[in-house]
Structures are given as structure tokens and as C-alpha cells.
Image (cartoon, helix red, strand yellow):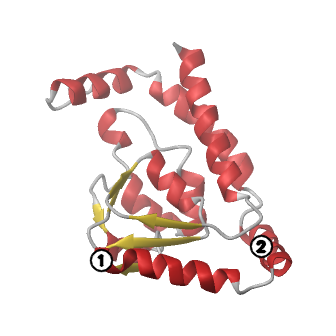
């Protein structure tokens, strides 16, 4: 039902926005495949560290829908061109390509990931909490003023797209393990 799709979209939007605007720096540590809303969670963080084996994918078009809620954060962290690569390219990308596109900041061997995450955390903790909060707030002012309204728009687009005939066919095809038979 449309009201449940809207509620799901609002919940994702609210979670991403809450994480994005936390006053202290946040670090995402990606250890495996990340898709759809999981990419949104990583993008809502200030720093992203990924294992060499990590992959990133936005499969929504193959499921008949759109990654509309994730898109504002993807464009904010990368560029429209890089966002197109993930949103329209339809293929999974490696952690190394994610660094090149600006989706994450560093790739490390899985065995080194925990130690590197600890190092990053300790380095961040060396800074003044108020200075870090001021810095983060000003970064958002410089580059992210439109993100909240874009997330709101993305919520509406996502809700609508997830209720479409193509979304129903896409999900059915995934569940049945077959290619989708698109209507249009």
C-alpha cells in the first residue's frame, strides 16, 4: 500500500538525515557488498573506509524503481557524473573505483581495516569537539544546504516509483529469479 511505501521512504530519509547532521564526525567502515540504502548510510557519514573486497551498487533501476533518497547524498559526496555511473550504469563497482569516484576515502586490506578505523577515530578524537562541530557545520553550510530539501523530494519520488507497475514486476522478477519483463 502507498502509505506503507511512504512510511518506509520517510524512515530511510529520517535515518540518513539524522546521521548526516550529527554534530561530531562519523566514520563508515565498509567490509562487504553495499547496495541501495546501505550506500546511503555510508554517504551520510563524513569519512568512508572500505575493505578491498567491498563493492557498491545501486540496483534500483533493475528492480523497476529509483534510488531517489540516496541520490542527494551521492551527488553531494561525489558529482553528478559519478552519481550517473552508479545510478544509471547499473553495475557493481569495486572499492578502488568507489575511491576514484569519491564515494569512499580509502581502501585497505580486510586484515588492516579495524586498526585503520581505530587510527582514524583516534586522530579525529585529537581534535576539539567544538572545533570539529563548527567545522562540520560550516562544511554543510558550504556544500549541503539543499540536501534536506532534496531528501524530501527524493522521498516523494521513491514512494511513487516503488508503487509503480515496473517496481512490482522488478521485485517479482528478483523473487522468482528471472529477468524482468518491463511494461513500457
Identified at 41% across, 34% down, the residue is: 65
Q: Can you identify the residue that label 1 sits on?
A: 111
Q: Is residue 59 visible?
A: yes
Tell me where residue 39 appears, x and y as whole percent: 46, 55
The answer to whether the residues at label 1 and label 2 have Cβ atoms under 8 Å apart is: no
Q: Earlier in the sequence, mark 1 or mark 2?
A: 1
Identified at 43% across, 22% down, the residue is: 164
> Looking at the image, is 6 positioned above or below residue 94?
above
SS at circle 2 = helix
> Looking at the image, is 116 positioned above or below residue 183?
below
Q: Quadrant of the C terminus?
A: top left
Crowding at dot 1, Cα within 10 Å, few <14 / some 14-19 / many 20+, comes out as few
Q: Can you identify the residue that label 2 sits on?
A: 142
> Looking at the image, is 160 positioned above or below residue 154?
above
Q: Is residue 184 visible?
A: no
SS at circle 1 = helix
Which of these two is toward me, 21 or 129? 129
Tell me where residue 114 appears, x and y as whole percent: 42, 74
Which of these two is toward me, 128 or 162? 128
Tell me where residue 71 appears, x and y as whole percent: 53, 52
Identified at 46% across, 69% down, the residue is: 103
Amino acid at each position: 500500500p502507498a502509505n506503507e511505501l511512504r512510511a518506509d521512504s520517510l524512515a530511510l530519509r529520517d535515518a540518513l538525515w539524522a546521521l548526516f547532521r550529527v554534530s561530531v564526525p562519523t566514520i563508515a567502515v565498509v567490509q562487504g557488498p553495499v547496495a541501495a540504502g546501505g550506500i546511503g548510510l555510508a554517504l551520510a557519514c563524513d569519512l568512508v573506509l572500505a575493505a578491498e573486497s567491498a563493492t557498491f551498487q545501486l540496483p534500483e533501476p533493475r528492480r523497476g524503481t529509483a534510488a531517489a533518497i540516496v541520490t542527494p547524498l551521492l551527488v553531494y559526496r561525489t558529482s553528478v557524473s559519478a552519481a550517473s555511473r552508479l545510478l544509471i550504469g547499473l553495475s557493481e563497482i569495486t572499492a578502488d573505483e568507489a575511491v576514484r569516484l569519491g564515494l569512499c576515502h580509502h581502501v585497505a586490506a580486510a586484515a588492516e581495516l579495524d586498526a585503520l578505523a581505530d587510527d582514524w577515530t583516534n586522530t579525529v578524537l585529537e581534535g576539539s569537539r567544538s572545533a570539529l562541530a563548527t567545522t562540520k557545520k560550516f562544511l554543510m553550510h558550504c556544500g549541503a544546504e539543499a540536501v534536506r530539501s532534496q531528501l524530501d523530494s527524493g522521498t516523494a519520488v521513491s514512494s511513487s516509483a516503488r508503487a509503480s507497475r515496473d517496481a512490482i514486476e522488478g521485485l517479482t522478477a528478483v523473487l522468482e529469479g528471472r529477468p524482468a519483463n518491463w511494461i513500457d
